[in-house]
Image (cartoon, helix red, strand yellow):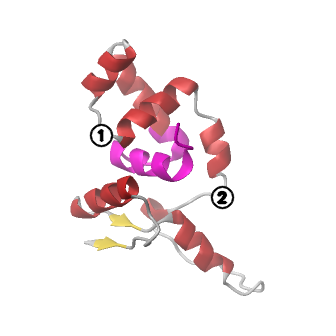
Amino acid sequence: MNGLCSATMDQAALIKALELVMLGETFIPSAMVLAILDELPPDYETRPSVPSDLEFSHDTATRAGNLSSREIQILEHLMVGDSNKVIARKLDIAESTIKVHIKAILRKIRVKNRTQAAMWASAHLKPH
């Protein structure tokens, strides 16, 4: 099990990070990786090899902007751990529609599962 957490992470993000690590995933906050990369000398020519499951993007704000208001609502429910059925009931839409939205969210923010999506949302979406 591998994980690196910041002492400044909020409680919800820390819990999600621990859940990922307990599932066998590796967790490193993108802000930490970016900070490390920023410390590389300007003449550093070759980008270090980053495993595909740890890739990050500099366009997180752009990706957040590509989410619809409904997708953001669903992400907010994922952050508190709601199941598809609970989200569907709260938003008064079909559970199958929730599944379609979640697949679109995962693709847009480039994560593999709903836990990673919830963690991404905790780090990138402004709380309401």
Residue 119, magenta (yes or no): yes
Q: Which three-letter amino acid code belongs to the residue tagged 2?
A: His
Front-lying residue, 111 or 19: 19
Q: Is label 1 in a helix, a strand or a loop? A: loop
Identify the residue shown where x is 29% and y is 27%.
Answer: 84
Residue 19, magenta (yes or no): no
Q: Which three-letter amino acid code belongs to the residue tagged 1?
A: Gly
The residue sitting at the right extreme is 43
- Location of residue 66 in the rendering, given as x and y in whole percent from the top left corner: 63, 35
**Segment colored magenta:** 106-128
- Location of residue 103 in the rendering, given as x and y in whole percent from the top left corner: 42, 33
Tally of numbered discs = 2
Determine which residue is flagged by label 1: 81
Q: Which mark is residue 58?
A: 2
The quarter holding residue 57 reads bottom right
Dot 1: within a 10 Å radius of its alpha carbon, few (fewer than 14), some, or many (20 or more) residues?
some
Sequence-wise, which precedes: disc 2 or disc 1? 2
Front-lying residue, 58 or 74: 74
Identify the residue shown where x is 48% and y is 46%.
Answer: 121
- Location of residue 108 in the rendering, given as x and y in whole percent from the top left corner: 54, 39
In this view of the protein, can residue 47 be seen by the observer? no
In this view of the protein, can residue 58 be seen by the observer? yes
Identify the residue shown where x is 53% and y is 75%.
Answer: 49
